[in-house]
Structure formats: C-alpha cells, structure tokens
C-alpha cells in the first residue's frame, strides 16, 4: 500500500499515540522504584497496548480470507495493519525497557519481532515502487497465474509461424524450379537479396526453432540462453531473415515479438516474486510471534 | 353494474362518410391518411383493383378502383383520401360499365390464358374478367408485339402480358430497395425496363423475385423452383398449399417458386418440435393437433453472496442503507416467441391449430425462446423466412395473427406495463379491441425525437432501439423487446417525442392512440400521478447525462469503446500489487466463478479490467429470446433467472464480459416422484455491480485502494488530478 496524503489521519493519530507513550515512558523510567520491567504496571500496560496493536495487525489475514464480509473496507484494515503494526514496535520496546530480555523465549520473541518488523518495512517500501516498475518494465503483463499457459501458447504460435515460413519457402522453391530455365544464367531470382531461398534455409529455420527458440520458450531457467538477450536474439533472427524473401519478413517480426513477450513475462515473474517474496518471512514469523507472544504472556503472568 | 367504456373512447376527432349507403367512421388521426379504398376494405366493402397492393404506395394507374364521390369525374379510391361527409358509391351501373370497358381494353392485349393462369390459376386480370362475365375482348389487340425476355436464369418476362400496373417497379424499389425496374417509353411504347433498358439477365437484377410476386398477371413468372431444402418432412404440393387457408391470397407463382421452402411435418404426442436455446431459421404453423410450449431451463440465479451475516445485519441496524435488497423479477410474464407469453410462476402454455411460433427465430435468426412439444399427434408446416415474410404480408393471415395476439397475449403485455397495472379489467378489454398492430422493417424509424406524439407503443415481436440525439451523436437509452413499451412520457409531456425509436429488426408493435391513452389518464388519476413522477425522474437523469456529455473531451478515450461504457472497473497499476484479492472476492461472492479478469486495456498507469461496462449501447440485450437480460430502472445490467443459456448475449458482447456459467440446481426426479435430483444448467452471468451493497465486492476487498468502479467520463476528465480519496465515483 502506498502511503500518501490519504494516510494523514493515521499518521497524526499514530504520532500522537507514540508521543503519548514516549511522554509517559520518561517519568516511568525516571521514577520507577524497581527499575524498568516488563512485569511492572507500566510495563504491562505497554505490553497490553502493544499486543492489542499486534493482534489487530494479525487480523488482517483473517480479513483477507473473508473478503466479502462487510466488516470494513480492506483498505481500512490494511492501513490499520501498517500503522498499528508499526506502532506496536516502540510500545513493545517500552514494555521490554529496550532490552532483549532474560530468557530464551523473550530473546526469540524479540528476534521474531525484528524479523516481522523489518520484513514489514521492506514490504511496505517495495509496494511503494515495485508496482510502478512492473507497469513500466512489463507492458505485456498478464495475470501471474496464467504466465505458464501464455508461454505454452507462445510456443505453439511460434511453431505455427515457423511452419508457415517453411511452407512458403517450399512454394518459393517450386516456383524457382519452374522459372529457372527461363532466366539468364548468373541472375539472382530476387533483386536485393544475397541468395535465392533454398532448402538449406528451411532446414536452418527448423534447426533454429528446435535448438534455440522452443527450448527458450518452454524452459524457465533461461538467462544464459541466446534469445534471453534482446540484442543477441535480434541478431540471430536477423541472420535468418535476410535469407528469405521480403514477403516473409513480417513473420520474423512476429517471432521477435514472441521472444520479447517471453522475456517480459519472465521479468514479470521475477518482479512478482520480489514484490511478494518478503511475505514468505513476514507471515510465518507473524504467526509465530503471536503464538509465542501468547505463551510469553501466560508464562510471565502465571509464573 | 357493468360500466360502459365505449363512450369514454369516442375520439375527439373522427371522419364520418358514407360508402354504398353504409355509415363509416374513421379515427381522426388515422383518417388523415386513409383512402376510400382502405376505408371500404375495413368495413367489408370490396373494390376491385389491379395496380394497388398492400404494402406498396398506391398510384391509381389501372383506374379499376374508381368510385363515384359526386364530383365531375370518378375518383381512384386507392389514392383518394376520405373527407368528412363524403358520399361514396362503389358499384353503380355506370361504374360497373367503366370497369368492364377497362377490363376489355386490358384483355385485348393479354395472351389469355397467360403463364400465371396456366401455372397457378390465379392471374388477377383473368380472374376479374371472369367475375365480370368477360370471355374475350371486342377490341383489337396491338399490331406490334412487345416481345419476351428470357435472359434471366430465374424469371421469365413476357411484356405481352404486362398491364403496366407498376406493381413490379414498386416492389423492386419500395420493398426491396434494389431500384432495378422502371418505366420506359411513352404512350403505346411504354413498358417496364431493367436498368437502362437492358435484358433482365444482363441488368443488376438480383433475382429476389419481388417483382414476380407483385405481378398480378403472367408478365413475370418463375422459370424454376428455388433449390431450398428443409431436410426431413413431407413436401407439400402447390395445390395443397393453396388449400391451406393462410396461403389463400398468396401468389401462386411465389408458392410454386418456393415449394421446397415449406414442409409438412408430423409429430407424435410427446415428441419435441423445437428446443429452447437452439439456433434455427424456420417458423412453425400448426395445422392439426395441439402442443405445449414451456421453458425447460430451471429458474436459477447466482446470488451475490456476502453481507448477510451478523456484522452486516448489525451494520444495517446501525446505518440503515438506502438500497433495498433485490426482491425478484418485476415481470409477471416471460416473453417468448409464440402467440402467448409464459407466466413466471408456471412457465407452460398451450398451442392450438392456427398458432404460429418461431417468428423471431425465422425472421431474425435469434435462438429458440422456448421448447415446444406435441401433446397430441400434430401436423405442422415448417417454413423458411421468405415464405413467412410473404405470409405476414397477407392481410387475412395478419388479421388472424393479430386476433390471436389480442386474445392471448395482449392483456398480459398491457398488465406488464406498470402504468396499466391498476387499470380495471373492463377497461383493458375495451382497449384490447381498439388498438392497432403495425409492422416495421429493420432500420425503420418508428418515431423521431421532437416529432409530435400521437400514440403509445407496445412491442409484440422484434427489438426497438431507443436513442437520444445530442450534438456529439446519438446516445442509446435502451433496447426494448417483446413486452417492452415506449411513448408514454411524450404523450404526457406536451405531445413531443423525447427520443428516437428505431426498429432493429422486423418489429410488430401495438399502437395505442393518444385519445385512448388520455381517456385512461382521465379515468384513473393515479396512473397520471405515477407517470408524472417517472417523467420528472427521467427528465432529471437526461439533463444530468446531457451535461456530463457536454463537459468531456470525447476524443480522449474513443479507443476500445470506452466512450460506450457507463461504469468501468479501473485498477491503478501504481498501487496494485497484483494480489488478485479483487478477483477472489468476486469469485467468493459468485459461487467460485469470477466475473472479472484482471487484464485488459491500459491507459497511462490504469488498467481497465475485463468486466461488464454497463454500456450505454448494450448490444448484449439485442435478441434475447426470453428478455432475460435487461436493465431495471438503474445502471446495472441484470440477467434474470429465467435465462435459457442460449449464449447469444455472450456472443453479442464485444468485450467478452458475459460468461456462460454452469449452475447446479435441484429439480424433480422423474424416476422417483417426490425426490429431487441435481442437474447442471448453464446461465449467462455478468458483473451486476453487486446491487445489494454500497460498493461492489471487488472494490471493497482491495487492500491497496487500487480498484475503483468509475464513471469513465468523470474519471478521464479528472485524470491527473488526484483527490485525497482517490478516484471513487
């Protein structure tokens, strides 16, 4: 979610809450008899407030799962998740007295909290610019789940185009064979071409498709392949293009477009993973944090 | 005490005249264009004619229809308009003498028996001559023959038999708009000609046969039968066809030409004659036996889920919404392509001998609207469009169809109009007999914006496009099908049409004259009040829409038909994280099938998602055989639960926004009475903006404030001017 002017209310509210928490923390530190402790009254209040904020932030998952329940717009829940999740960190620090804690549980909790907090910050930052990057760098973007299907269709389309080219070349060969006796020796069949089309071009096309294009289109790990580089791809296709009649050149342009679309879809896959990859840490760490936090609360209060 | 409404219906203006001593009264508005011939025909008085034919503009050439109106010269009744107080005599001795002489003159040059008389025995000239008692002519035939033209593959031209009635010319020009035929020469050299007097086979003639069908004599006859083949069924001979009463009066030449375009079929009791949703091109006419027509598709609807749990109920208590939940369909009858409509609660009706069904399928190639099954052993005629077209032009056939419509369907149509819902049954019964049925060809303007209004229309078959003319172009307001109506507001608001109404295909409409309409308003004041309220709302909507149109630079977004949209689902790609929450929310709300695709046209950094655009010109609505896809008095397009799943709307939508969704329903198990069985039926589905909620589910579920339903004009006008709340409409 992009934090823009529409978050003004949340920002002001959060700053006020933080200021209040901070203002109350100073006398707590200065005048505490037993010292700053998570089990003190002030510490427990900070823990309660911080936990409530974390709990609300955690409820975003529940809201996302029940998408059509009319319990507040998802946008409002996301804003709450961002700001209250952010605010929970200083409040928990206030609760912990800016310490890691004495036992392994509290230390693990703090580490988890840091993971959740930092991954959340990273996610929020990514969401500020990655969508724009995707829009600009992937004009041929499609639905992420459909990428494999689209790539299969591209491979089929490329195969059909290559078949069409070969068929056209065969017809050209037949025409040349008929017209050959009528030509003066030494003349080329078409003006402006280096060589007349022959069977070798057709087999070159087929070999190019089988060895380069099809593997490139169907494979996923293909950074080192020839067609993954737009410049090298254009050069390779151009080398074939000049061997055929001009009437067939638009088909080679189509092949180039297919390769470009494949590159863009792979780029989309990459960017999509970057945009969503941080969730692989954030979500499980959040659940673990909430669970262990509950254990910590029970253990700390009871024992 | 039974109330007599006849006095209520006395028109304010009427034309009274006398024909052969019989008092004839013609309605004021209609009287202005009624000829003596038409007035006589309506009152059962037959005036012979040769050059006049229904559906063609009269020209008064043959003079056989002359009548005595008390003036110095006799008037040709086919062109002379009636006047108040006119005294007409159609068959005095003098007039009969005149006709006899005319027939003798015509028969002098006529090669009796002509080709038509030999082929089908219905040459109109020879028939009239026989009726008059003429066996030959005392006049000498012409010395110089006019010749024949056999250059056409389909039609033989015998100028000897031509009586220069011009019916072929009018048929070619007025009916078919081919403009091949015309007159050539003067006086005794006059004749008909093709293009610049070319032989017919070398002209631009397309051999449609209209000239031949129009020709009253054997001047234009067919050379061969049209090679149509309806497949199975028994062929029916010309003689047998002419015995069928609906084909009496239809040109024998035409029937002979198209003998393979009509077949006799027999069905045993229980056999299905046609199935709903199937595409076809034929109509059926029941000769013997009975059939039933019904909708076999179970009523089913994918309701929009969500918002019915505890929190929503609580929200409703805390914040009562202005929106009332959808309570079901407004129509009590489902319009189908048959003489009768089906009641919503019991979708079954009976068909009897003389009933015609499948007109819309035959004329306009729409899918079959219902299933017809023989209840007893049945004999039907199945016919192609050209035969049905000819039958529809036959006056007696049309009268029969009209009568059936009045008896069986008109009342339900009238009751289906909200303004007639509170009118008493006696009033409806009176109105039923006074209304007029009119036919309109595809593209014909029924009424034009700004013209004075004299009537209110109710559609029997076909589709009517209602548009509003603005400086930037025409705005489509609605497509109206069977049971639809228009014209009521203009009658109320000073008598000027507020929109253009154009026949999209072959339309038949019931016309209720202004006098009867006003009588209803006087008699039932609540109807007037209801109508005035609707008129106020619509005027306000029109004004707002007009202001919106004026304020927008229309050239900005003409691509991909965005200008046609009234509501777009727009995703801000700079905010959208491609989480697909919008798509999943839509699927969750609609039985797991999403009505939107997060892909489509891109403009700047916005994506116009593939989802129903609630188009101004809803092409999806055209041709629905059961009127299931429609707009209620609001923006969203609704598909009702009696959709038969034919898929026509999905094919019509140019943006692929309508999908055919399989829905599981529980129906009675025929093998186990009292038990239910699951059956999968297919229904059309499209985004309907989740009408039970303030916001569509897709927008509500977007966590990044990226999805918005916007009015495209407002949205694109504000592009580049973000507000603090984004682009919410």
Image: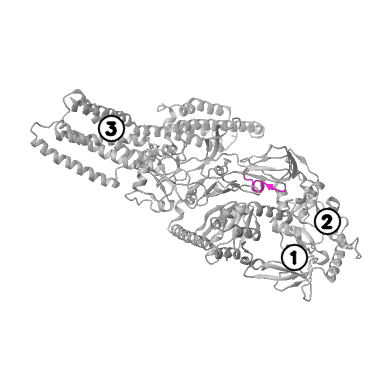
Q: Nearer the viewer, residue A223 or A57?
A: A57
Q: Residue at x 35, y 46 (%)?
A: B317
| Dot 2 and dot 3 within a common chain | no
The numbered mark 2 sits on a residue in which chain? B
The residue at 49%/53% (across/down) is B633
The picture places residue B610, in percent across and down from the top left corner, at 47, 42
B417 relative position to A9: left or right: right
Q: What is the secondary structure assignment of the residue under circle 1?
A: helix
- Look at the numbered discs 2 and 3 and tell me whether their residues touch, using CB distance below 8 Å: no
Q: How many marks?
A: 3
* Occupied quadrant, residue B230: top right
| Magenta-tinted stretch | B354-367
Q: Quadrant of the N terminus of chain B?
A: bottom right
Q: Which of the labelled discs sits on residue B724, or is there none?
A: none
Q: Nearer the viewer, mark 1 or mark 3?
A: 1
Residue B536 at x, y = what percent? 47, 61
Q: Residue at x 21, y 24 (%)?
A: A105
Q: Quadrant of residue A84?
A: top left
Which element carries disc 2, helix, strand or loop?
Answer: loop
Residue B121: x %, y % from top left? 84, 53
Is any part of residue A1 visible from this angle? no
Q: Residues within 10 Å of mark 3 (few under 14, many from 20)?
A: many
């Amino acid at each position: 979610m992009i934090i823009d002017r529409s978050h003004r209310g949340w920002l002001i509210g959060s700053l006020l809450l933080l200021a209040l928490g901070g203002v109350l923390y100073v006398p707590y530190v200065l005048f505490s008899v037993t010292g700053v402790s998570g089990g003190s009254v002030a510490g427990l209040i900070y823990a309660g407030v911080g936990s409530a904020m974390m709990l609300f932030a955690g409820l975003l998952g529940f809201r996302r799962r029940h998408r059509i329940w009319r319990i507040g717009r998802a946008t409002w829940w996301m804003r709450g998740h961002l700001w209250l999740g952010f605010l929970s960190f200083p409040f928990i620090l206030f609760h912990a007295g800016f310490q890691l804690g004495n036992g392994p549980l509290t230390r693990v909790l703090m580490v988890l909290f840091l993971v959740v907090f930092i991954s959340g910050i990273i996610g929020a930052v990514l969401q500020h610019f990655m969508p724009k990057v995707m829009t600009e760098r992937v004009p041929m973007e499609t639905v992420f789940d459909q990428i494999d299907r689209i790539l299969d269709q591209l491979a089929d389309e490329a195969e059909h185009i290559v078949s069409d080219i070969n068929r056209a070349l065969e017809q050209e060969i037949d025409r040349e064979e008929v017209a050959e006796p009528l030509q003066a020796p030494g003349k080329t069949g078409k003006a402006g071409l280096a060589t007349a089309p022959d069977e070798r071009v057709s087999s070159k096309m087929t070999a190019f498709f089988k060895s380069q294009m099809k593997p490139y289109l169907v494979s996923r790990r293909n950074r080192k392949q020839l067609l993954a580089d737009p410049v090298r791809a254009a050069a390779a296709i151009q080398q074939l293009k000049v061997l055929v009649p001009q009437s067939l050149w638009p088909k080679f342009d189509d092949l180039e477009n297919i390769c470009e679309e494949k590159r863009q879809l792979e780029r989309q896959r990459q960017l999509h993973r970057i945009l969503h990859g941080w969730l692989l840490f954030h979500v499980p760490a959040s659940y673990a944090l909430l669970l262990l936090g509950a254990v910590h609360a029970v253990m700390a209060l009871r024992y | 005490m039974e109330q007599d409404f006849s006095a209520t219906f006395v028109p304010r203006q009427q034309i009274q005249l006398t024909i052969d001593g019989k008092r004839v009264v013609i309605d004021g508005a209609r009287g202005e264009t009624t000829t003596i011939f038409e007035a006589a025909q309506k009152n059962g008085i037959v005036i012979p004619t040769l050059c006049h034919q229904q559906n063609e503009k009269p020209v008064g050439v043959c003079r056989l229809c002359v009548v005595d109106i008390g003036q110095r010269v006799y008037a040709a009744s086919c062109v002379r308009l009636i006047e108040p107080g006119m005294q007409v005599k159609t068959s005095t001795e003098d007039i009969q003498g005149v006709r006899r002489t005319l027939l003798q003159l015509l028969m002098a040059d006529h090669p009796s028996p002509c080709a038509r008389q030999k082929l089908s025995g219905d040459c109109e000239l020879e028939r009239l001559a026989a009726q008059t008692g003429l066996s030959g002519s005392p006049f000498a035939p012409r010395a110089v023959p006019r010749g024949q033209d056999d250059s056409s593959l389909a039609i033989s031209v015998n100028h000897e038999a031509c009586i220069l009635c011009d019916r072929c010319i009018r048929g070619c020009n007025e009916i078919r708009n081919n403009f091949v035929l015309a007159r050539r020469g003067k006086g005794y050299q006059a004749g008909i000609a093709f293009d610049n007097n070319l032989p017919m086979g070398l002209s631009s003639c397309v051999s449609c046969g209209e000239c031949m069908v129009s020709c009253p004599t054997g001047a234009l006859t067919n050379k061969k039968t049209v090679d149509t083949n309806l497949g199975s069924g028994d062929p029916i001979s010309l003689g047998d066809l002419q015995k069928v009463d609906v084909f009496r009066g239809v040109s024998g030449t035409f029937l002979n030409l198209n003998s393979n375009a009509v077949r006799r079929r027999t069905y045993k009791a229980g056999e299905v004659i046609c199935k709903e949703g199937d595409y076809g091109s034929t109509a059926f006419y029941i000769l013997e036996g009975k059939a039933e027509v019904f909708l076999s598709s179970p009523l089913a609807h994918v309701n929009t889920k969500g918002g019915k749990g505890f929190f929503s109920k609580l929200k409703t208590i805390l914040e009562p919404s202005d929106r009332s939940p959808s309570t079901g369909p407004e129509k009590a009858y489902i319009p189908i392509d048959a003489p009768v409509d089906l009641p919503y609660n019991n979708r079954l009706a009976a068909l009897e001998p003389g009933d015609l069904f499948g007109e819309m399928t035959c004329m306009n190639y729409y899918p079959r609207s219902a299933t017809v099954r023989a209840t007893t052993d049945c004999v039907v005629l199945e016919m192609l469009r050209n035969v049905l077209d000819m039958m529809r032009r036959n006056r007696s056939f049309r009268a029969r169809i009209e009568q059936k419509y009045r008896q069986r369907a008109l009342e339900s149509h009238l009751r289906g109009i909200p303004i007639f819902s509170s009118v008493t049954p006696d009033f409806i019964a009176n109105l039923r007999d006074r209304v007029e049925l009119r036919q309109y060809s595809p593209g014909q303007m029924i009424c034009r914006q700004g013209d004075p209004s004299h009537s209110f229309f109710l559609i029997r078959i076909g589709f009517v496009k209602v548009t509003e003319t603005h400086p930037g172009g025409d705005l489509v307001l609605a497509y109206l099908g069977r049971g639809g109506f228009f014209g009521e507001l203009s009658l109320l608001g000073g008598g000027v049409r507020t929109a253009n109404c154009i026949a999209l295909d072959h339309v038949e409409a019931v016309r209720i004259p202004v006098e009867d309409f006003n009588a209803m308003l006087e008699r039932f004041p609540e109807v007037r009040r209801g109508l005035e309220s609707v008129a106020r709302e619509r005027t306000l909507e029109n004004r707002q829409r007009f202001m919106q149109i004026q304020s927008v630079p229309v050239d900005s977004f003409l691509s991909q038909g965005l200008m046609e949209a009234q509501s777009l689902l727009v995703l801000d790609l700079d905010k959208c994280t491609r989480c697909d929450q919008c798509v999943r929310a839509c699927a969750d709300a609609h039985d797991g099938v999403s009505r939107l695709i997060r892909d489509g046209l891109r403009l700047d950094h916005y994506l116009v998602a593939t989802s129903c655009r609630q188009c101004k010109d809803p092409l999806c609505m055209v041709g629905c055989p059961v009127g299931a896809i429609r707009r209620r008095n609001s923006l969203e397009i609704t598909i009702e639960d009696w959709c038969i799943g034919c898929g026509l709307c999905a094919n019509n939508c140019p943006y692929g926004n309508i999908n055919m969704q399989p829905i599981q329903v529980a129906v009675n198990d025929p093998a186990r009475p009292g038990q239910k069985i699951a059956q999968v039926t297919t229904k059309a589905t499209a985004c309907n903006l989740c009408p039970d909620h303030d916001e569509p589910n897709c927008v509500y579920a977007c966590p990044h404030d990226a999805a918005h339903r916007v009015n495209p004009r407002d949205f694109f006008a504000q592009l580049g001017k973000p507000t603090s709340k984004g682009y919410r409409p």
